[in-house]
Amino acid sequence: PRMEPKDRLQKPRREVRPERGLRRKAIAQAALDILGNSGSRALTHRAIDQHLGFPDGTTSAYYRRREDLIGAAVRELFQNDFNRFETGIGELVESGRKLDMEEVVVFFHGMIQDVRTKSSEASKLARYECFLLARRDEEANRLLQELFATRERLDEQIFRMLAAPDPKDAAARLGYTLRGVFFTLAFLPEPAD
């Protein structure tokens, strides 16, 4: 006897998954979520598949090694920062007007506050995890250094506009300082006024 449509078992609705073209980005974001919520030991292909509702093995088709997942997470996190930074710096540099130090300080403080106030706790913790992973993993370290070098080249342009004696050195020192300031402001409560 033929079953009527209403008698057939209905398949459970699957979660809405990212389209194929967006899967790499979704996997990278899921890696950050896992890093931020559970730490680096929890970052596995299976954990990402479960997080995204993918069939087992899907993440492995996009990123073969755990190191590749780490690289994707680091790129995703810092590319988002870099995009915001590049837009703001681009506006300052392209304005062609003379910059003063106060304006540059306000810009960088705004960047830090933007990440501080608009990032989830998991995203903030994922940042720490990415730095820790880069300390332990040569590939992640190299990637992070490349990302920072790109940023420092933009900072160098600003210091040229400010007529710094050694713009390259000033940009490198600013990078070190900003990373320290960022971690202090992002993870410690602000002092009361």
Image: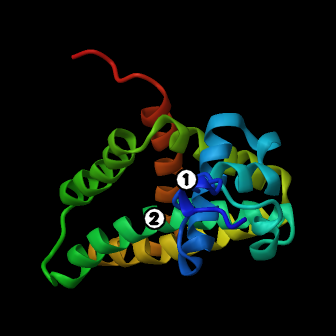
* 68 is higher (above) or lower (below) than 192: below
- Occupied quadrant, residue 57: bottom right
Mark closer to the observer (2, 1): 2
Q: Real-space Cα distance between discs 2 and 1? A: 19 Å
Mark carried by residue 139: none
Question: Marks 2 and 1: CB-CB under 8 Å?
Answer: no
> Residue 187 location in percent, x, y?
49, 30
* 19 is higher (above) or lower (below) than 174: below
| Residue identified by numbered label 2 | 80
Tell which residue pokes out farthest to the top in this image.
192
> Residue 104 location in percent, x, y?
26, 60
| Residue identified by numbered label 1 | 176
Q: Is residue 156 at least partly visible in the picture?
A: yes
Picture residue at 54% right of the left edge, 39% below the top: 122
Question: How would you rate the neighbour count of disc 2 (Cα within 10 Å): few for under 14, some for 14-19, many for 20 or more?
Answer: few
* 186 is higher (above) or lower (below) than 84: above
Q: Amino acid at mark 1?
A: Tyr
Q: Amino acid at mark 2?
A: Asn
Q: Relative to the observer, which residue lies in front, 47 or 190?
A: 47
Q: Is residue 128 at least partly visible in the picture?
A: no
Chain-order first, disc 2 or disc 1: 2
Question: How would you rate the neighbour count of disc 1 (Cα within 10 Å): few for under 14, some for 14-19, many for 20 or more?
Answer: few
Picture residue at 59% right of the left edge, 78% below the top: 20
> Residue 24 location in percent, x, y?
62, 72
- In the image: residue 34, left or right of residue 149: right
Tell which residue pokes out farthest to the front in this image.
1
- In the image: residue 11, left or right of residue 167: right
